[in-house]
Every structure is written in structure tokens, then in C-alpha cells.
Amino acid sequence: GAVVSQHPSWVICKSGTSVKIECRSLDFQATTMFWYRQFPKQSLMLMATSNEGSKATYEQGVEKDKFLINHASLTLSTLTVTSAHPEDSSFYICSARPTATLGNTIYFGEGSWLTVV
Amino acid sequence: AQTVTQSQPEMSVQEAETVTLSCTYDTSESDYYLFWYKQPPSRQMILVIRQEAYKQQNATENRFSVNFQKAAKSFSLKISDSQLGDAAMYFCAYSPGTASKLTFGTGTRLQVTL
């Protein structure tokens, strides 16, 4: 089946630094990818929709200058958490929809744990 | 805005028995998709079952089936012959049309006991 890979799986960074998380579709092209955030024992919350070749669409309440999203190719979207703070510590997970697929088939990455110390 | 409600934070079922997880949603759309996802401790999101709103027939996948009541905006998941490996968080999710962005419920933690 289709595979979406996230890297890194785990990352620890110092407060004030920036960290980049990659979301890559390994065997299909994805015009659109999605980034979610999941706090411990909570549900997934959509942060933004990443569109290849154009600006991301952010959900209400998500700071676009803090969570930079770049979708430079049909197989790669990146989420950069800028000037990270401990409250940004969370599980970040992406999903992708194959461009060539009709209907609503969505594939999730394995997720990335971010800890800001 | 669409909302998804899961009223059961935790459920428990004995191995080989049947359990039903509840989900209700609110939308003004006529074309949408509903999903049940399983999230084990690894945090990987695993699609359990999917239902297209325009289909009247309830979706089934082996031991998993749904009861989709469109007028009542209800979408429950039935797990038959429960297995230890079914223990996980289960999230109900909604997607408008083919937009693919999901709105998740708060989840139900399912325990499976011997």
C-alpha cells in the first residue's frame, strides 16, 4: 500500500531554536498534504493544509509565522516550528492524499514527537 | 463548522465479545465521508473503515461494521469477536466531499480483557 514517511520520528530541541519535520509520500504524488497536532491523551487537531506550489492554508488559531509549511514538490511537505518553546512540545502527524486517486483515500505518516527543552 | 462527538471516553470488552463505539457529527454538507481510525500506542493512524455519505449500505470490513444513520447524523462502529489486538484509541472522523482534511472526535479508548 501507499506509504507516507515522516522524519524525524523523535526530536529534542532547545527553546528558541527552530526544528524542521519532513513529510514524504514515497510511492505516490500528493498535491495536498495535511499537518495535524496531537497533545497527550487528546485528539488530532488540523493545523494546516499544505498545497504544492502555493501557500499553505492555516486553521483558525494557528500561527502561520510560527509553523512554517513548505510544499516544494509533489512528494514532500515540511513543517518548521520556529523559535520553539516548551508549549510546542507535541506529536505532529501528516497525511497525504494521492493526486491520482478518486474518492477520499488518505494516508498518514508515522508521526513525529517534538520535545522542546 | 463541522463537529464530531464521541461520548464514550473509555470502553471495555471481553475477548470474543462484541462492542459498539458511538459517534455523532454535525454538518450542513450533503456530500461527505466518515471514518473510524485506530491509534495503537505506536501512534500510527490505521484506517479501520470508511463510509461515503451517499451510500445507504453500511460499510463492513471483516469484523468491523458501521451503523450509519444519516438523518440522525450517527456513525457507530461495531467490533465483533473482539481480539486483544483491537485494544487502542479509536477516533471517529469526518471529511467534507473529497477535501481530505479530517475533523476528529475526542476518541474512545478500548480495552479488551481476557
Image (cartoon, helix red, strand yellow):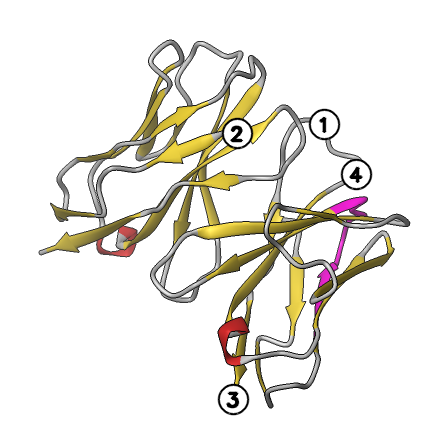
Q: In the picture provided, is B5 more to the left or to the right than A45?
A: left
Q: Nearer the viewer, residue A100 or A13?
A: A13
Give residue A117's mark.
Answer: 3
Residue at the image point whose x is 81% and y is 56% from the top? A75
Q: Is residue B72 visible?
A: yes
Badges 3 and 4, same chain? yes
Q: Give the image location of residue A61, x and y in percent.
A: 59, 51
Give residue A102's mark.
Answer: 1
> Which chain does tag 1 point to?
A
Q: Give the image location of residue A67, x and y in percent.
A: 69, 64
Q: Which residues are magenta?
A: A20-32
Label 1 – label 4 distance at C-alpha: 8 Å
Query: Could you tell me which secondary element the residue under label 2 belongs to?
Result: loop
Which residue type carries mark 1?
Leu
Residue at the image point whose x is 63% and y is 49% from the top? A1
Q: Badge 4: how crowded within 10 Å, few (<14), some, or many (20+)?
A: few
Tell me whether the residue at label 2 lies in contact with that at label 3, contact meaning CB atoms closer than 8 angstroms: no
Label 1 – label 3 distance at C-alpha: 43 Å
Label 2 – label 3 distance at C-alpha: 35 Å
Label 2 – label 4 distance at C-alpha: 26 Å
Which residue type carries mark 3?
Val
Q: Disc 2 marks which residue?
A: B1
Which residue type carries mark 4?
Thr
Closer to the eye: label 2 or 4: 2
